[in-house]
Image: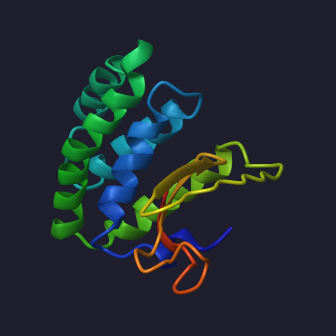
Amino acid sequence: MPDVQSALDAESVALVAANSLATAMGTGIWEMIRTGMGAIFQRRGYDQGAIEGQLDGDASLVAGDQADAIRGELVGPWRRRLQALVDADPTVVAEFAALIAQVESRLPRESGSWVQNIKAEGHAVVNTVVGGKQVNNYMDPRRRADGSGADDPVEGELLG
């Protein structure tokens, strides 16, 4: 596993931490990240019980068919809260990175292999999901029907 702390900078750590937080809501690792976040806030003068209460309130919204959508909606407010901590105390980046690494170590590992054969023609856009990762492929519009020209897809951003 790559060193999470070195992979995160002060600008992205709040987003990654907020995403980890929202993703953990309603899962078996929720208590660990909830307590960890509460402690991080508490070390900066916040009431840990109040922070954990806010986290529990938000986590209680994550249920049913809309759980993933609700998790997505919760990332923004928590990113802003966590970014405020980073802005006020850049040393919190290391604490967030350590907590994220703990979360990642408890997530199930991806295993197996996948093969997908996808044919796209014309000016197609292909969106695939492999192992929980979304890959967007955009065909170069200069591609000609006879196969000559710029015929390699331009791989889009890997979202995960």
Residue at the location (60% across, 77% down)? 146
Residue at the location (50% across, 79% down)? 6
Given residues 116 and 124, the one toward you in this image is 124
Is the N terminus in the top left, top right, bottom left or bottom right quadrant?
Answer: bottom right
Residue 105, image x, y percentages: 66, 52
Given residues 83 and 121, the one toward you in this image is 121
Q: Report which quarter residue 54 is drawn in.
A: top left
* Residue positioned most to the bottom: 149
* Left or right of residue 31, residue 59 in this image: left
Report whether residue 13 is seen. yes
Please tell me whether residue 62 is drawn above or below residue 72 in the rendered image.
above
Residue 99, image x, y percentages: 49, 54
- State how the image is colored: rainbow
* Residue positioned most to the right: 112
Please tell me whether residue 124 is drawn above or below residue 61 in the rendered image.
below
Q: Report which quarter residue 88 is drawn in.
A: bottom left
Please tell me whether residue 160 is drawn above or below residue 4 in the rendered image.
above
Given residues 45 and 75, the one toward you in this image is 75
